[in-house]
Amino acid sequence: MQPFTTLLAFTTLLTAATAQYVGLNTSQEFNIRTCLKPNQPGKERFDNLWLVGHHSGAGQSDAVFEPTRTNVTDAGYLTPANQTTASGEALYNQMFNLGNPFPWQLEMMYNTAPYGAWEPVRIQAGGLDKGDEAEGWVFLNSTGLQYSGSGSGFNGWLVCEWWLQMPQLFYRVGAGLYNESAPTPSSCADVYLMPEYI
Ligand SMILES: *[C@@H]1O[C@H](CO)[C@@H](O)[C@H](O)[C@H]1NC(C)=O
Ligand SMILES: *[C@@H]1O[C@H](CO)[C@@H](O)[C@H](O)[C@H]1NC(C)=O
Ligand SMILES: *[C@@H]1O[C@H](CO)[C@@H](O)[C@H](O)[C@H]1NC(C)=O
Ligand SMILES: *[C@@H]1O[C@H](CO)[C@@H](O)[C@H](O)[C@H]1NC(C)=O
Ligand SMILES: *[C@@H]1O[C@H](CO)[C@@H](O)[C@H](O)[C@H]1NC(C)=O
């Protein structure tokens, strides 16, 4: 099952990222599990899936899901973003410890399908800004991981079986940028992303 872990040799990125991050704050690591939002009959296959990175290039992976929690399930943790929401909620970067000496970071790929109703999500090495993603500021509340960064707004998480032929993480863009009532496609489900502490 090792294709899901992204233990890559990408020397330039490794050097840059290692220099920037000495030691990871892994004090409260968690795995991320889907919880199906109510009133979605026939979508049970999208419930209780576990988030992992799926290699999609040097230092980058698509955010996908596996059916079981294993020691390959990516360990997430939060670091302060030193930002707050308009209502004063502290914001964090959603980081991942994939067993490397440098971190990986959740990134919202808001420009993949400009003006689309949803966009994919990646897990990128080093948290480096590659120019085509939004900063992944998040916070946690009782319905799990909430995005609150720049780019395209946020109207919830979506899991779809599309071009990777496995459940993949997308998000609905915010109100005003697209019709927020866009129906959920038959191959997708609306989910919460819940932290399950390790
Ligand atoms: C994961 O667990 C399996 C079975 O216990 C073990 O063989 C494997 O070495 C573990 N892998 C890692 C990366 O810890
Ligand atoms: C480490 O992460 C925890 C959980 O997010 C946080 O409460 C704590 O302040 C962090 N510690 C440092 C030194 O950043
Ligand atoms: C947040 O502030 C702390 C303390 O000043 C600093 O060490 C850290 O690098 C800052 N984090 C970011 C993402 O700017
Ligand atoms: C959690 O935060 C989201 C995004 O701000 C909000 O829509 C939701 O109502 C919050 N959940 C609870 C239980 O407060
Ligand atoms: C938004 O989508 C819903 C559901 O398809 C539709 O009923 C509604 O007319 C749409 N609204 C706009 C402004 O296009």
Image (cartoon, helix red, strand yellow):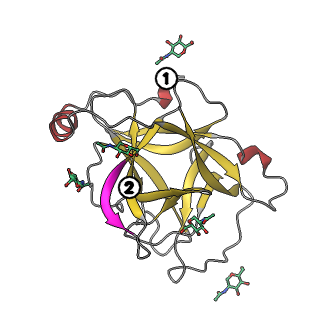
For image coordinates 59% across by 51% down, the residue present is 193
| Number of marks drawn | 2
* Ligand 2 under 8 Å from disc 2 Cβ: yes
Kindly identify the amino acid type of the residue bearing the numbered disc 2: Tyr
Q: Which marked residue is nearer to the observer: mark 2 or mark 1? A: 2
Q: Which circle marks residue 35 in the picture?
A: none
Specify the segment rendered in magenta.
79-84
Q: Is residue 101 left or right of residue 5?
A: left
For image coordinates 54% across by 79% down, the residue present is 175
Quarter of the figure with residue 190: bottom right
Q: Main secondary structure of the magenta part?
A: strand
Quarter of the figure with residue 109: bottom left
Q: Which circle marks residue 92 in the picture?
A: 2
**Does the magenta run of residues contain 83?**
yes
Asked if the residue at tag 1 contacts the one at tag 2, i.e. Cβ–Cβ closer than 8 Å, the answer is no
Front one among 38 and 66 = 38
Q: Which circle marks residue 2 in the picture?
A: 1
Identify the secondary structure beneath mark 2. strand
Quarter of the figure with residue 66: top right
Identify the secondary structure beneath mark 1. helix
For image coordinates 48% across by 34% down, the residue present is 74
Expressed as whole percent of the image width and height from the top left, the position of residue 10 reads: 25, 32
Q: Is residue 41 visible?
A: yes
Kindly identify the amino acid type of the residue bearing the numbered disc 1: Gln
